[in-house]
Structures are given as structure tokens and as C-alpha cells.
Amino acid sequence: MVTWFPAGYFRRHVLPLLGIGLPLLALSIWLYADQASFARRAIVTTGTVQEVLRGAPIYRDDGQTSVRINGRVRYTANNVEIVSVVPLGSCGGGLAATCVSSKAGDTIKVAYDPTDVGRAKVVPWSGLPMWPVPHVLIWATALISLVCLVAAGINVGAVRPIRPLNARRHDGRSHHSDSPDDRKA
């Protein structure tokens, strides 16, 4: 009997790649579905910035720094006053002290999830899209999963190239022949 893969090849070279690629692909699909469903069911309201919170500086390899800017925002959701920390943006290139567009007392548009009123984000000037651009984390997990799945496919194809189902020689012999040539194939 002919084995399709050398002993242990599939377990060593293909299964680990599939074990990484498939869960990461499922994770990226789930994260994007969550992001898109938030954009579809979100309710837009007006909020007031109570306080601007600056994060610690993030130093990049090129020497530039950036600062994450959050705001404590008060808005009304389901007739209840909510105060939530909402990302307002980030500032980079050494302009961290002067680039904040919102300050305490400003009124901004906030989109919140009616099932989880504490989950909110600032609405961009163009509005909430039905199919938002995926977050960087979603791009990264999808890219890693695709690389792993392509590598698994290459590993499978390199050992046993894809060939048609009826790849036997058709030189006039019977398909049920017991010749040594047919046993080797």
C-alpha cells in the first residue's frame, strides 16, 4: 500500500500551520463581524466632553512619539445619563500638546451600542459606514492566517502535487490488472 505522505510529514509540517491559520482566520472574521454589527446597530447621539485624558507617549522606531487621546464623555442613552471613556484620536510627530481638537465642554457626536450603552465611539464626519474599514488588529490576524494557510497548501502541494483523479496510464491494460507497474503507482 502506498502512503500519501511520508511518515509524520502531515503532522509535523501541515497540522501546525492549519492549527494557527484556521483559528486566526475565525478570530479575524469574528472581530470584523463585531465591528460591522456595531456600526449597523449603533445609535448616534450628542455627547459633552467632560475631561480630556492623555495617554503615555508611545515611542516609535523612527524617533517620533505619539500620544493616545481619550475623553470622558457624558451622553444620554435609553434615557439614562452615561459617562464613558471614548477614544478621541491620537497625536504624533511631536505635536502631542497642541493637536487635540476636542477640549472639556465641547459637544461631539457619539455612537453607542443600544445593547451595551457603555460601548461608544466618536462618529466621524462622514457618518458610520455599514461596512467599516477593518481595524489594524483584524488586518494583522487575517494576514497571519492567510500566510499560514498558503504555507500549509504549499507543503501539501510540494509533497503530492495535485493531479487528476484518473491519472493512471491508459495504455490499453485493464484497470484491475495485477502487474507490478500498477502496484507501484
Image (tube, rainbow, N blue to C red):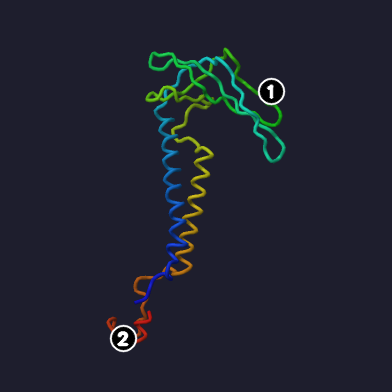
Find disc 2 in the rendering and name its residue.
Answer: 173
Residue 140 position within the rendered picture, expressed as x and y whole percent measured from the top left: 53, 44
Image height check: is 28 above or below 155? above
Find disc 1 in the rendering and name its residue.
Answer: 97
Q: At 30% across and 85% down in the image, what residue appears?
A: 178
Residue 139 position within the rendered picture, expressed as x and y whole percent measured from the top left: 52, 43
Q: Is residue 168 left or right of residue 156?
A: left
Q: Amino acid at mark 2?
A: Arg
Image height check: is 15 above or below 116? below
Q: Residues within 10 Å of mark 2 (few under 14, many from 20)?
A: few
Q: At 46% across and 69% down in the image, what residue appears?
A: 159
Q: Secondary structure at mark 1?
A: loop
| Corner quadrant of residue 71 | top right
Q: Residues within 10 Å of mark 1 (few under 14, many from 20)?
A: few
| Corner quadrant of residue 7 | bottom left
Q: Amino acid at mark 1?
A: Ala
Give the camera-side residue of 62 and 47: 62
Residue 145: assigned label: none
Tag nearer the camera, 2 or 1: 1
Q: Quarter holding the C terminus?
A: bottom left
Cα distance in 3D space between marks 2 and 1? 84 Å
Q: Nearer the N terminus, badge 2 or badge 1?
A: 1
